[in-house]
Structures are given as structure tokens and as C-alpha cells.
Amino acid sequence: MKSTAQSHRFSRRTLLSGLGLGGAFLPLLESEPVGAQAGAFPKRLVIMVTPEGTIQDRFWPAAAGANYTLNEITNPLESFKADIQIIKGIDMKSAKDDPGVNGAHDNVCHVLTGVRGHAGPRGDHDLGTAVVAAGGISLDQYVANQLKPQTKLASLVMGVQINWTALQQARLSWTDRNQSVTPEEDPYRLFDTLFSGFNMPAAMIDKSRAEGRSVLDYVAKDLTRFSARLGTEDQARVQAHLNAVRELERGLDPRFDSAGSGCVVPILEGDKLDTKANPNYPQIGKLQMDLLVAALACDMTRIATFEWNSGVGNLVMSWLGPEFQGAGDEFPTRTLHDMTHRAGQSAAHTDRKTRSDQWHVEQFAYFLSKLKEIKEGDGTLLDNTAVLLLNHMHDGAAHSHGPHLPVILAGRGGGYFKPGQFVDLGDPVPHNALLVELARAMGVETDSFGDPQYNGTSALSMLRA
């Protein structure tokens, strides 16, 4: 015989199904007030990767410990000092020892696998045989396989203008050796993927968009009746979720902004942004981050990877000012890749690379702010998430894999991590150990990940609460 709580949850599922809203709302409706009891909220894992290394003496804080002072590149995280750990001394040893890695651009497939890559003919730059794919499963897919979360998406793989999308060696997520997961770079497709649980016919969705109407308009009356049957806390949860959906719609199409929320998006090609155009990089990134926050908050997924560009490509960060635009005598080209190679040649070149790195940290700060806005019991969504910001290079100009990859770990991972410190490891630690810590934070007990020769179970114990 079913318990009262079980029957209550089943009745809610039936009601939601009848409204055509699908299972996306279910995680928001608890059978009892959740409060702040342990285990009440799921743990989440997000791994963000940025390209092209950094300017080392402008990235690291001056002194280790809790009383650290942020440097120029990391300064946008000042208001999150208690929520982050900056970790110096993470070395991508697996890539250093991989004979197929001809440069740090080839090491992306090592980032979440920590194992020697799959070598084959490389089609660009006439480099002959090189690493063209990962040699094993990536951490995000491994954790998803172990936990088997009952979420809409077992994992979410996404990014912004990953210029090497057609080349596997630029991908982060792998289900097995030489089996990559294609990242979703289009927020419009991602929105439809995430919210397909509304079960509206495609023709109705198209009609609503053509008319500038929200998909929620079609179920408003039913939702009003449905909410009347819920308790006060559940009503608030439903309303908060509906507000989030409308805000996402407004960002994707400004015609939904009938209430004048201040969300202004440039209208390109039929009210949609061109997701491949360089000038739209910031807006596309924001939309992708907003969608990821919604996916985590609605428990549509608990595991995500997010790749910002690939570095090698034609990204021109024109929104940062005239020195990042066009061509000229002092700055002959303006791509992120080119200015990375020129960093250190002059103060102006170094300043330009510094600003590009700082901008990506600003985006990370925005993402953390959105996670921190969402309350979960006595904590926040950020408290229940482990968010890793990792650059896959030590120094972009030198194409080096370490010994000091730029690493920032945010959140508490549901109580596993101890933020609020700058950790200087001294002797470099293979990045496999960091992957192990992330798996453990998610509840996957393992002492090794990737190539076992690079693992250490206590190397990063100082990160734990």
C-alpha cells in the first residue's frame, strides 16, 4: 500500500501530465517542506573550460590561505571570495607524457579524461599524426553513468562558439575512447530541448513564437486552478519556475518582454541571434549560462560541461574596445589566438591578453551570481554545486600543459568542499587528482580516474570541508 506522501506525489504527477507540463516541474514540488535537512537537495557538478592559458603573474593571489588578495585577472570574483578556492599547482601530466600531443590545443581531450589520447591523422596545419580523440571516458559521463540520475538529461554538454567543433580533439565530453559528445552551442535549440516537457505540439510552439506569445499563455488558466490545490511553499516554487521560464523566453526573443524587464537582446535574422557571429559571443554566452542555471535549478540535469570557445579560431573580442578590433600597425590581428601568442612581446600585448582573460572570469562571476540567487533551504544552489573553472593551458603563448593550470573551484558541492581560500600546492599535482575529488564530491567513491599512475587520494585533501 502506498504511503500518503507517495500518493500525494503521484497525484501531482498526474495533474502536471494533464496540464501538458511534463516532468520538468516535479523536482520543484516537494511532498513536504524541505527546510535545510541534509540531503534534501541534489548535488550538482559544472565544469567550465576557457582557452589559451593566462598571464601567470596577473592571475594568482599573492599569499596562500584564507586572507588572500585577488589579482588583476581574478578580481571580478571579489564578492565571491568566500565561495571559491583558487588552486595553484594543478599539472596536466597525462598530456605532457602523451607523445601524440603536439601542442596544448591537442590536450583538450585530456581535460576530463586524464588518459593518453587516441592518435590518428590530423587534418590541419599539416602536423601529420597527432591526438585526434580522447583515449577514454570523461569525468562528466563517468559520474552520470555511476549515479544514473533520474533527470531529463543525464548530463548536459554545451558551449559557446567552439570553433573546432568538427574536430574531435577540441571536445571535452567522451562516452568512451574515440566517442565524443557533440556540444550544444545554440541556445534556441537548447531551450526547446530543456522545455520539451511542456508537450506542446510543434505547430503550437511555432504559432506562439510568431505571435510573440509565451508557451505559458496556453496553460495559464489550468495553472491557476492547479496552484490553488497546493500549499503556500509549493505555490511559490511553481511561480518562481514560471517566472524563470518567461525570463528565458524574453532573452531568446525580445518580443516576450511585454512587461519591460530590461532584458534587451539585439535582433538579428528574424528575431534570433546568429550564434556563430563574433559580436554575439557575450549574448550567446549569457543565454547559455541562464539556460544552464535553469536546468540545474529545475533538476533537468545535475552534471554539465561548458566550453568557452576553443582558442584556435577567429574569435575577435570586439566588444572590449578598439584595440581588440580590426587590424593596424600595433596590433596586426585581433583574434584571441593571435593575441595570446603575442602576450609578453610588449606591455600593450600583455594588457590585451590580460583583459581577455579577465572578461571570461567576469562571465564566471555572473554564472556564480545566478546560482547564488536561488535559495535551497538555508543555503543556495551554489552551495549544493561544485563549479570548476579551468583553463586547459598554463601559458597560451608557450602552449604549455602546466605546472600551474589556472584553476578556480566554486561552491561547496553539498558540503564536500571548503571554499574561501587560495591553495598553493607547491609541488605540482596531476590534474587526475582533481577529477577524483570532483567525482567524490558527487558521491562517487573512487580512488582513481583516468590513467592510475597520475592519481593520488590525499593530494588535494586540503580542498575538503
Image: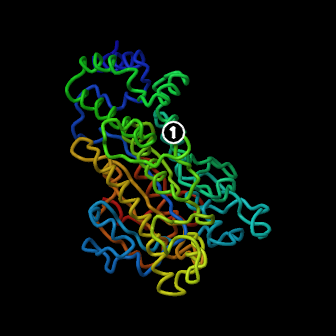
Q: Is residue 291 above or below residue 15?
A: below
Q: Quadrant of residue 422?
A: bottom left
The extreme bottom residue here reads: 346
Q: Nearer the viewer, residue 17 or 215?
A: 215
Residue drawn 32% across and 20% down?
Answer: 223
Looking at the image, residue 133 sits to the left or right of residue 259; the answer is: right
Please give the name of the residue rendered at 21% of the width and 45% of the height, measured from the top-left corner. Answer: 378
Q: Residue 229, relative to residue 311: is it above or below?
A: above
- Disc tally is 1
Q: Position of residue 209 (x, y in %)?
A: 48, 30
Give coordinates of residue 445: x percent, y percent.
Answer: 45, 50
Mark 1 surroundings within 10 Å by alpha-carbon count, few (fewer than 14), some (14 through 19), many (20 or more) = some
- Judging by the rendered image, the residue that carries numbered circle 1 is 154
* Residue 428 drawn at (x, y percent): 48, 75
Judge by depth and name the residue closer to the eye, 260 or 384.
260
Residue at (53, 21) in percent of width and height: 201
Which quarter of the rendered picture does the C terminus lie within?
bottom left
Q: Residue at x 27, y 21 (%)?
A: 227
Q: Amino acid at mark 1?
A: Ala
Q: Is 196 situated left or right of 376 in this image?
A: right
Work out which quarter of the rendered image holds the N terminus and state it: top left
Please give left or right for residue 205 compared with residue 38 in the image: right
The reply to whether residue 6 is visible in this rendering is no
Colouring mode (rainbow / by chain / secondary structure / one colour): rainbow
Q: Helix, strand or loop at disc 1?
A: loop
